[in-house]
Image (spheres, grey):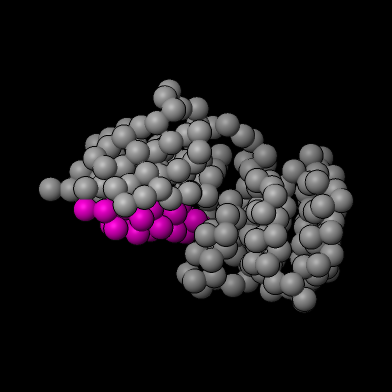
Amino acid sequence: MRVLIVEDEPSFVEALRISLTREGYDVGSAGDGKTGLEAFRDDRPDVVLLDLMLPGLSGLDVLRAIRRDSAVPVIVVSAKDAEADIVAALELGADDYLTKPYSVRELIARVRAATRRGAIVPDRETVTMGSATLDHSTLRLRLTHGDQDLPKKEFEVMALLMEQPGRVVPREEFLDKVWGYTWIGDTRTLDQHIRRLRRRLESDPDAPTIETVRGVGYRLKLRE
Ligand code: CA
């Protein structure tokens, strides 16, 4: 398994290189966005750890370019912890978001999780609730006024809800099945995915809605 670290702070890179190498990963690194993109194209890593504040091309520019031709797991690791930054990264298709300072153990758990695949295997090609239909073959959410392409993780969160209508899906189940971990210090990645799905669903009065069940998780239900 190859990991590419795109990060301009050498001390971070070295700490990660040591830990990841010890875990058996093959580690490459790049200190700016442009070199990072070149390294990505040359090395074809299995996971990318991406800083946002980089010299030259920003982390978001790098992410956008990667997503044009690859579904490789990308974990954004950034000191930026504003909601807007997290949302922007997830909207561009980041799989996960970790804010600095982070625990190396947690980061490694997330890298390991990102390389495990195929957690969600649907029974059917499409599943429908109210006016919303989720299509597994195209990763699309169909609503009355049109189709929406969902980033992979957002699709998987929605699939878990749609497959179990009316059931409260615990937070741990989302983390386990969509991200592959349950131990996590920062659950904003899940919250952001829920928020974005809600925005999509709210635009259609006949679509179901995602209810928060405090302290437990989320439930999909039809609006009254
Ligand atoms: Ca930086």
Residue 218 left/right relative to 1: left
Residue 163 left/right relative to 49: left
Q: Give the residue at x 79% y 39%.
A: 1
Q: Residue furthest left?
A: 224
Q: Residue 21 location in percent, x, y?
A: 83, 47
Q: Give the residue at x 59% y 72%.
A: 80
Vertical arrangement, residue 159 with respect to residue 4, above or below = above
Vertical arrangement, residue 35 with respect to residue 48, above or below = below
Q: Give the residue at x 79% y 60%.
A: 37
Q: Is the magenta stretch mostly helix, strand or loop?
A: helix
Among the 4 quarters of the image, the one containing residue 170 = top left
Q: Does the magenta run of residues contain 53?
A: no
Q: Does the magenta run of residues contain 202?
A: yes
Which segment did they paint magenta? 186-205
Residue 147 left/right relative to 50: left
Is 85 or 199 nearer to us in this picture?
199
Q: Residue 143 location in percent, x, y?
A: 33, 47
Q: Residue furthest front?
A: 145
Q: Residue 164 location in percent, x, y?
A: 32, 33
Residue 37 appears in view: yes
Q: Give the residue at x 68% y 67%.
A: 61
Residue 42 left/right relative to 164: right
Vertical arrangement, residue 9 with respect to residue 37, above or below = below
Is 69 or 121 nearer to us in this picture?
69
